[in-house]
Image (cartoon, rainbow, N blue to C red):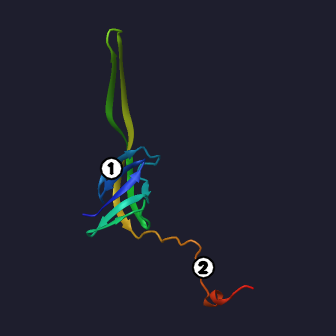
Amino acid sequence: MDYAIIETGGKQYKVTAGQEILVDKIDSADGSKFVTTKILLVRTNGSILIGQPYITNRQVIGKVIGPVLGDKIRVSKFKAKVRYRKNIGFRASLTKILIEKIQLDSIKPRVKNQIKKDPKALTRVKK
């Protein structure tokens, strides 16, 4: 079973291809593409790759299905003998995402200050 652990909205999710997940609200249109490179761990073909903190050259690609409201949470406050009662409700705004694939080696790694080294330049000495 191939899976990845991604981070979005400050939370971590274990995802596999074809899975639907609920994440905190994302400002994206329905049917738009969801791409994240914040991957913490990938397991493929029995080998595990752990990021420090993120794995480079990997992407998790999905499709935004649409906004969803979470379960209603009811909170009641009560103080005895003073006739104080208060009820508060909350419903989280979530986004449903269909994970399409975990793409490996999808991004070419960036090499900082890539300079072709001249063997003659290394032997020269400035006076």
The quarter of the rendered structure image containing the C terminus is bottom right
Question: Callout 2: 10 Å neighbours few (<14), some, many (20+)?
Answer: few
Kind of residue sitting beneath label 2: Ile
Kindly indicate the quadrant of the structure image that contains residue 126: bottom right
Position of residue 43 in the picture relative to residue 113 (left or right): left
Across and down, in percent, residue 69 comes to 36, 38
* Secondary structure found at label 2: loop
Residue at 43% in and 69% down: 106
Is 70 drawn above or below residue 117 in the view shown? above
- Is tag 1's residue or tag 2's residue first in the polypeptide sequence? 1
Across and down, in percent, residue 53 comes to 43, 59
* Secondary structure found at label 1: strand
Is 42 drawn above or below residue 81 in the view shown? below
Kind of residue sitting beneath label 1: Ile
Across and down, in percent, residue 21 comes to 32, 50
- The residue wearing badge 1 is 21
Is 83 drawn above or below residue 55 in the view shown? above
Across and down, in percent, residue 49 comes to 34, 66
Is 93 drawn above or below residue 36 in the view shown? above
- The residue wearing badge 2 is 115
Q: CA distance from mark 1 to mark 2?
A: 44 Å
